Image (tube, coloured by chain):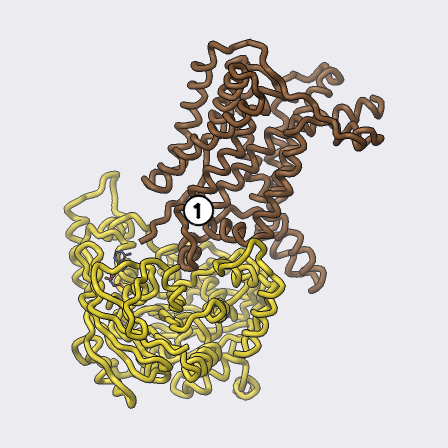
Chain colours: A yellow, B brown
Amino acid sequence: MDVRVELRDIEKSFGPVKANAGISLDIPSGSIQGILGENGAGKSTLMKVLSGFIRPDSGRILLDGKAASIGSPADAIRAGVGMLHQDPLDFPPLRLVDDFVLGRPGGIGPERRSAAAELARLAGRFGFALDPEGYVDALTVGERQQLEILRLLWIGARVLILDEPTTGISLPQKEKLFATLRELASEGMTVLFVSHKLEDVEALCDRAAVLRQGCLAGEAEPPFSSEALVSLMFGKAVELAPKRRLEPGRSVLAAKGVCLESPRLRIQDLSLCVRSGEVIGLAGMEGSGQALFLGACAGLARPVAGSFCLEAEGLDMTGRSHLDYKRAGVAYLPAARLEQALVPGLTLGEHFTLAEGGRGLFVDRKAAAKLAEERIAAYNIKGRPESRIEELSGGNQQRALLALLTSPLSLILVEHPTRGLDIESTIYIWGKLKERCAAGSSIVFISSDLDEILQYSDRVLVFFAGRASPPLDAASLDVERLGGLIGGKGWDEIEGKAGRA
Amino acid sequence: MTGDVLIVNLAGLLASAAPLIFAVIGETISERAGVINLSMNGMILLSAMGSFSVALATGSLAAGFLAGAAIGALVALVVAAAGISLRQSQVAVGFVLALLCRDLSYFLGNPVMGQVGPRLPPAPIPLLAGLPVAGPLLFRQDLMTYLSLLLVAGAWLFLFKTRPGLVLRGIGEKPEAAYARGARVKALRYLYTVLGGAIAGLAGPIYSLSVKAGWKGSISGLDGLGWIVLSITIFGGWKPFRAAFGCYLFALLQWLGLVLQPLLPGLPSQVLQVAPFPLMILTLLLVNLGKAEWVERSLATLPGPARRRLSRVLRALNATPPAALGTPFEED
Ligand SMILES: Nc1ncnc2c1ncn2[C@@H]1O[C@H](COP(=O)(O)OP(=O)(O)O)[C@@H](O)[C@H]1O
Ligand SMILES: [Mg+2]
């Protein structure tokens, strides 16, 4: 079972970009190897080379000391290398058992029955609740990962690569994932765990390699020092901004007794008053109602009962359209940046021209170019006015989105402001958001990252299956308590307190 | 109308839907693999003309049918090469081919125009043909009509009950995922596009050597059928049995048009001729109800078991195209 992996001088360029510039790495069997690096450091590229998805320009891969020729995923599977990709590579419209079988060599008949039994057995072993006859598109991101990991084990993976597996899964799912990986490693599996999150690597890995701009910046072993890892990742120390207390300002948004309904969910009687300059974090497992509420704050969902007022203007907005909200100074940044907020195919410069509106039929090229240059500099976007938006990395797309916001704004609603971004981009994005707060805008955001909620919010609303907590002071919360609330524990206490207040 | 006449008419319906079924199943296989072959209309005309010419020249029906399949496969190969290897728009290439093949068939078909050629004879199945009702309805058909029924069942079995069929659906749904699992996406797409083309190509000889025997150029009455084939593929939700139902429904609507015409003298004849088309659209709408938001919302108010059962039915009816339909895939 045990396989030692050696990478030798892996090089891969995409056009002018050197994604991997001669990386060598030794990974002993039976251990969990962390691969750390900021967005765009070349982690995914290196892993795709190992799993045959990308052919390197040069370099060699040795498995157990023997040169392995991995030219396609099929070769990698034969060699026992399986990869869980950053975007789940499964088949949403299929049943779990069909997804499980697809690609496994065998006879004409898919032998669904034995496959389903095998899936159930493996799921039982690791404590996953997966119904073989259910459909993949009904699963959460975490469950899709579980399915894929079981599938890789079933087809005989002895080297397991996981690319950013902790993005978008819940805390309990993350704990279950870590326990599973530890168990597999103890049985001799070689695990490669890719992440841009320090705390995940520190909590799980037996050793870590840090990539920076396509090169191996260094390696580390436990006990890990966060400062050392951060300076390896960025080539410099990065500091969190200190938290600042806020004087309550005038009310910006008042939601009174709001009830919302979606096909799957019902939110009852939610009241919230957002004050100017305030940051409110909405916490909860994906699909607990926070996204529905945030959409309603932007006029994207109609409340069944209750009212929304933008009180600075004494404005009753209940039942108004998104456009009306927008005119009243409410901005909404959805999580699906490329699908819902940006226009793939248009350049960065064209986006600024679009957002500014401008007068007249023709685009004023000179003014547009000047505007784009200014904004790109002001928001430190790595890209040129003529770069197409989909070519930018996630962090730079998010910066562009912020740069596109017009001013002044009274309320900024953000879904997952830093999902998938590394620490430096995260800090940068929040720096920009806080600048907006200082200028009087309020922010309501959703995040599944508990640390982000606690670090940046003034007050927190926790959602659990459509139930919303009263606003909680972020200073009174810690990760354990917040995690408990998200999982449905400790609600009696807060609701009792709110009743008394 | 007496029972006997009705049975004869229904039997004729089965036969007249046979070419549609071959074409629709062929297209379904190709689209399930992610390649949209829009050339259908011209391809069917070309294979009808080509197979008729070959059968006329050789006197062999088998040679005629083989020629039809070969023409279908060749045209599909052009679509595959342009779409898969050259990464051109499959829609654009298919559309141009549809026009090109049609003109080509009229031009090349001039010498054989109006000639009398061989014709596929009925092949009654001994014993079974003597059964009451079922005999004349099912067992006195010609070979290709029998095969059309087997084709539907076979395609369904292959797509949904076999391992290669699962991979076929995978490469049309998410080619990068299928590739990650070791499938040779490009080669398989070539294979299934050409195979689908060959099956669809048989629609031509079924017309010119059986259902509408002969070649009459632009008045053959075949122009336009290829577009119907494409819409029935969508109507069929890329599922063989539903696609076959669509073919029979369309054949029935056309036949009703002919039968009702004399009974409704006040009605302009065009109304009944085009009626099948809007009716198909209406059915398509009904079938896809499950996707509408208001349906979902009213479902949510139902109690658990009833809701689950109903949403299962709606889900089964729902037709979602293969997610990667018409898009190229680059293996690194
Ligand atoms: N298919 C591709 N085409 C062009 N550039 C790419 C491609 N994949 C990755 N890159 C570039 O290579 C660099 C490394 O990317 P990646 O390996 O995905 O980084 P990471 O996973 O560490 O965030 C980035 O600059 C990225 O833009
Ligand atoms: Mg990556």
- Amino acid of disc 1: Leu
Q: Please determine whether, in this image, residue A78 is positioned above or below residue B26.
A: below
Residue A247 appears in the rendering: no
What percent of the width, then of the height, locates residue A423? Answer: 27, 75
* Residue most extreme to the bottom: A223
Q: Please determine whether, in this image, residue B256 is positioned above or below residue B56.
A: below
Q: Residue at x 48, y 62 (%)?
A: A296
Query: Residue at label 1?
Result: B188
Q: Quadrant of the N terminus of chain A?
A: bottom left
**Residue closest to the eye, B97 or A371:** B97
What percent of the width, then of the height, locates residue A352? Answer: 25, 52
The quadrant where ligand 1 appears is bottom left
- Total of numbered circles in the picture? 1
- Determine crowd level at label 1: few under 14, some 14-19, many 20+ residues with C-alpha closer than 10 A: some
Q: Could you say whether the residue bearing mark 1 is in a helix, strand or loop? A: helix
What percent of the width, then of the height, locates residue B195? Answer: 49, 38
Tell me the subunit letter for badge 1: B
Q: Residue at x 55, y 9 (%)?
A: B114
**Residue closest to the eye, A424 or A257:** A424
What percent of the width, then of the height, locates residue B20? Answer: 59, 30
**Residue closest to the eye, A328 or B165:** B165
